[in-house]
């Protein structure tokens, strides 16, 4: 009995088998049951494939990119996608190549040494003040995003730099100040990225699911919620661990001054500035954000001008991100084109119809659902592919703004981390600081409440001011 009740005692092969068993049972159950009224056969098959993919993403029984490809193949084989072109819909979307461009830009900034130089400059300004160092860390999450969009890459660089500082300050691992910094790196760092369209997987997938956004449009809509969550979350983290901030006897200079700028850093900086300029001026030239990103990719890989060789690009890009996003878009498209998303939303709307005259209450119920789904889905692309189409389809018959409901799903789903497996860099960071899952979960639950309160008190009025009211 103990073996059954405690999954940790199971042999690893049995655990993997159990994960596959759950996913397969859910898949076959949806596929073989009689189709409910209003749901087409193709829609039922699409839901079965989505259920399989979501379960495999949640349990990580397969590499996430492999799960996505399996989902696309099943869409075609089962007829949920009419042909291979429809099955590969996501691979034809510009946001996928936009991601490749910004990941390449991040690689160039990292390999050139510019990212670490920027981090060191920020940290040296702390002058031995632990509170100032912490405040500068929170600020760096937003500022460094413009040069290093990926939160995972930024965290992997910053963790080593901050470890050097804490070592020189004689702060032991497990100290409350050490934990506060590392918990912030693992849990709050991502918020600086999602405020920008070029900020990594979350904004790229979400923008692709909700419709084309310009760089400026995304920043106008998402900067306030995510920067507010970062500021308030950082403040709460400080008060939770404030006893650890009382450090004494700290040397004023924790790190040696950086050396002179290298040619590769100048080139990387120039490419970043050019790309950012094109993104900021999209209102004038009308280029899709993918175009400046791909221009940057070409410059970075051009001999003598660029920073990376082709072999470095192939080896370090992280191609699983490409496949995860493309396949997520394909699965979400199948939900929409087969009518499965509309059927799913009508089922939800049926329960919420009696609250139609109370739109805030309806959105609150949706936010609770978003948080519950996110808690069981560590893969953000899978979460977005499942939740956004349903949330937007549910909004229309209830008289709500579909875009606001979609954006709320992004804000709630990407603002809290509930356990250590929240990402590869997060696992690494938490382990190095001896931060356990109970502490991560506690802060994740606190952040969920904070995010929903800020959404209703600050973000909804702001979105209304910029032309996106909750009720249309």
Image (tube, rainbow, N blue to C red):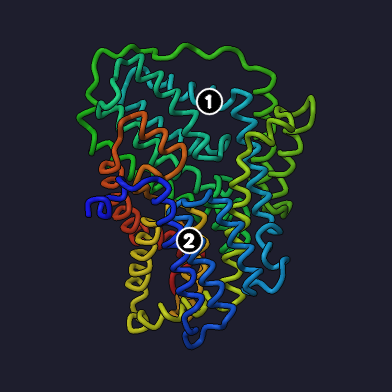
The one of 29 and 291 positioned closer to us in this rendering: 29
Per the image, the residue denoted by label 1 is 118
The one of 8 and 312 positioned closer to us in this rendering: 8
Where residue 205 appears, as percent x and y from the top left, is 56, 55
Q: Residue at x 42, y 21 (%)?
A: 125
- Residue contact between numbered discs 1 and 2, judged by CB atoms under 8 Å: no
Where residue 307 appears, as percent x and y from the top left, is 70, 27
Per the image, the residue denoted by label 2 is 54
Q: Secondary structure at mark 2?
A: helix
Q: Residue at x 41, y 18 (%)?
A: 164
- In the shown orientation, is residue 225 left or right of residue 85? left
- Spatial CA distance of label 1 from label 2 is 38 Å
In this view, the residue farthest toward the left is: 243
Up-down relation of residue 29 to residue 108 (above or below): below
Dot 2 crowding, Cα within 10 Å, few <14, some 14–19, many 20+: many
Q: Quadrant of residue 181?
A: top left
Q: Residue at x 66, y 49 (%)?
A: 98
Nearer to us of marks 1 and 2 is 2
């Amino acid at each position: 009995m103990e073996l059954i009740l405690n999954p940790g005692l199971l042999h690893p092969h049995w655990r993997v088998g159990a994960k596959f068993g759950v996913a397969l049972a859910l898949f076959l159950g949806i596929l073989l049951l009689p189709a409910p009224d209003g749901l087409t056969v193709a829609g039922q098959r699409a839901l079965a494939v989505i259920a399989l993919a979501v379960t495999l993403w949640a349990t990580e029984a397969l590499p996430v990119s492999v799960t996505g490809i399996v989902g696309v193949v099943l869409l075609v084989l089962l007829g949920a996608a009419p042909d291979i072109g429809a099955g590969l819909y996501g691979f034809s979307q510009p946001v996928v190549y936009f991601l490749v461009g910004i990941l390449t830009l991040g690689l160039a900034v990292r390999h050139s040494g510019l990212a670490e130089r920027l981090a060191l400059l920020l940290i040296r300004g702390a002058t031995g003040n632990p509170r100032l160092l912490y405040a500068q860390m929170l600020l760096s999450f937003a500022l460094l995003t413009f040069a290093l969009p990926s939160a995972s890459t930024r965290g992997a660089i910053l963790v080593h730099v901050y470890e050097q500082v804490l070592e020189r300050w004689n702060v032991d691992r497990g100290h409350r100040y050490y934990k506060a910094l590392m918990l912030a790196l693992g849990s709050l760092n991502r918020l600086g990225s999602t405020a920008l369209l070029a900020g990594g997987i979350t904004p790229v997938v979400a923008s692709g699911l909700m419709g084309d956004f310009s760089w400026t449009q995304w920043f106008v809509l998402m900067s306030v919620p995510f920067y507010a969550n970062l500021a308030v979350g950082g403040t709460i983290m400080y008060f939770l661990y404030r006893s650890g901030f009382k450090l004494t006897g700290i040397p004023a200079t924790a790190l040696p001054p950086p050396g002179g700028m290298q040619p590769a850093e100048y080139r990387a900086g120039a490419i970043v500035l050019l790309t950012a300029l094109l993104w900021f001026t999209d209102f004038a030239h009308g280029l899709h954000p993918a175009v400046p990103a791909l221009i940057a990719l070409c410059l970075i890989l051009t001999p003598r001008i660029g920073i990376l060789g082709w072999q470095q690009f192939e080896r370090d890009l992280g191609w699983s991100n490409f496949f995860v996003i493309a396949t997520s878009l394909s699965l979400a498209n199948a939900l929409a084109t087969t009518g499965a998303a509309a059927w799913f939303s009508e089922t939800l709307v049926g329960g919420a119809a009696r609250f139609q005259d109370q739109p805030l209450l309806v959105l609150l119920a949706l936010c609770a659902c978003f948080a519950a789904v996110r808690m069981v889905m560590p893969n953000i692309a899978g979460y977005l592919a499942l939740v956004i189409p349903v949330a937007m389809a549910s909004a229309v018959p209830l008289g709500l703004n579909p875009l606001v409901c979609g954006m709320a799903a992004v804000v709630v789903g990407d603002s809290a981390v509930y356990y250590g497996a929240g990402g590869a860099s997060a696992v690494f960071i938490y382990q190095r600081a001896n931060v356990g899952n109970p502490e991560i979960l506690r802060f994740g639950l606190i952040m969920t409440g904070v995010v929903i309160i800020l959404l209703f008190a600050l973000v909804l009025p702001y979105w209304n001011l910029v032309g996106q009211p909750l009720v249309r």
